[in-house]
Amino acid sequence: MGKQITEYSLYRWRYILGYGIVGLAIIGLLIVTGLFIPGGLTHAEMDSVVTSNALTFSLSAFDPATMINLPYHILQRISIEVLGVSSFSIKLPSLLLGALSALGMLLLLTTWFRRNVAVITAVLVITTGQFLFVAQNGTASIVYIFWSVWLLVAATMVSRRAKGLILWKIALFGIAALSLYTPLSFYILLALLGSIILHPHLRYLVRRLSKPKLLFASVCALVLVTPLAYAIVRQPSLGLTLLGVPGSIPDLQANGIQLLKQYFDFITPSSNVLMTPMYGLGSMALILLGIFRLFTTKYTARSYLITTWIILLLPVLLVNPAFTSVTFVPILLLMAMGIQALIGNWYQLFPRNPYARIAGLIPLAVLIGGMMMTGIDRYAYGYMYDPNTAGNFSKDLQLLNRQLALSDRGLTTLVVSQAELPFYRVVVEHNKDVALAAKAQPAKTIIVTHSAQKITSQTADLHQIITDDMSQNADRFYIYKSRIK
């Protein structure tokens, strides 16, 4: 008698192999995207560096506006202080939070769905262009995913009374408090609270929790949120910003069209800093299947949470269509529900025929593999070769750091335009023997940026022009060497 399929080593080790592939994919993709694709900095990343460098904990110089995304900017400030100002140090907090978000997604999916569904969904989601972009982008956009994922993970562990329950309770309240520093995170907490109020099983689980431990966790959360509360008292408009209330009346029709294009415009895709549509056609088909599944299983706690979350976010997104990252986790869960429905329906057709069940995995593997490779290719080629996209990323910092690393440069003056001044002031603070000026000053080496190229030195000769073949204006820096020995 031949071996049963369950007796093969490959079958027994299938989930370990699957988790290993997911882990290697996370590490590999984050390294590649962090260092090489797209390989430059956007204006938003430079502004984030300026904000992080301006953090102060002095009450006399306190600026309430710095409270927005404060946890992320603290991480970025630490990274810059330790590693200096470089593309890697600027992006490092996002890369770390991206890796933790991917780990949280896998843990969340494993607890909410069967392991095969969890592995497949994790692979598909991690290789989407949106996740790869925000995971390497040196701005706070990754925290929308990070807070959402780990809030659900901690809430799930608390509801299931997992090992180390008190730590999970503290983590839940701590993450909830820190997430309030991020715009629109309030609606995630509101969705969780609404699900607890509406669903009887969740109400029962909350009533079973230890009240003294909940009180202790609440006190920890209040301590963490105290600076934000103080900032809102000082500047009430900050609270409106965190709630996503715009400063002017938005064009709802234009915003609605923009939202539809971001998710469903597969005929005329656009390229900018973030490519659209956000998800491929195959992924969107799975998401729509997940929405159908959501309506057919609306009695579960999971369905209550996702439905409440979407209902709360839709009007907010209509006012703020740029905040697409806040929809990432609900879409992740809808995609998982779609994959679960796809696999479940196939298995229901052949409940006892093992060969038919295995044969169904072949087209599924082709589908998943194709979607994964398409996502990676679209991201790589789009951000490297599409002129509308690649032109938004500047490699000036890498080019400048190479010049500042030269041992024979001596005392150096960096000449920049007025618009470049805030970012390069941070660069100069973290480099020795470098002065910043709006016009050429006496020095052994004078470096003039492209925007300030009309400024020349009367005491130095042009020595070199530093170019970048990925920029429309290739002449990025002019290097002058002093005539005075």
Image (spheres, helix red, strand yellow):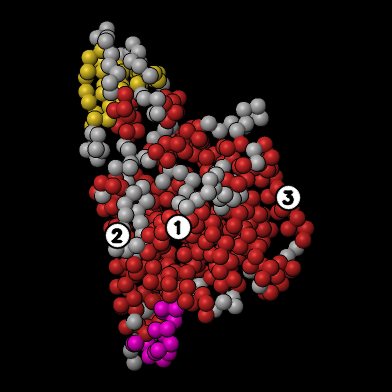
**Label 1 to label 3: alpha-carbon separation:** 44 Å
| Left or right position of 443 against 245 | left
> Does 399 sit above or below residue 259?
above
Q: Label 3 is placed on what type of residue?
A: Val
Q: Is residue 201 left or right of residue 247?
A: right
Residue under numbered circle 3: 219
SS category of the residue bearing label 2 = loop
Q: Earlier in the sequence, mark 3 or mark 2?
A: 3
**Outermost residue toward the top in this view:** 484
What's the residue type where badge 1 is placed? Gln
* The furthest residue to the right: 212
Q: Is residue 401 visible?
A: yes
Q: Are marks 1 and 2 in contact (CB under 8 Å)?
A: no
Which of the two labelled residues, at mark 1 and mark 3, occupies the earlier sequence position? 3
Q: How far apart, in angstroms, are the residues tagged by discs 1 and 2? A: 19 Å
Who's the residue at 42% across and 83% down the image? Answer: 345
Q: Nearer the viewer, residue 336 or 159?
A: 336
Compare residues 16 and 405 and report the one nearer the observer: 405
**Mark sitting on residue 139:** none
Residue lying at 69% horizontally and 40% vertically, measured from the top left = 233
- Picture coordinates of residue 317 (x, y %)? 50, 57
In the image, is residue 60 above or below residue 280? above
Residue underneath mark 2: 268
325 vs 158: above or below = above
Q: For the residue carrying disc 2, how many other residues have a C-alpha within 10 Å: few (<14), some (14-19), or many (20+)?
A: few
Residue 253 - label: 1
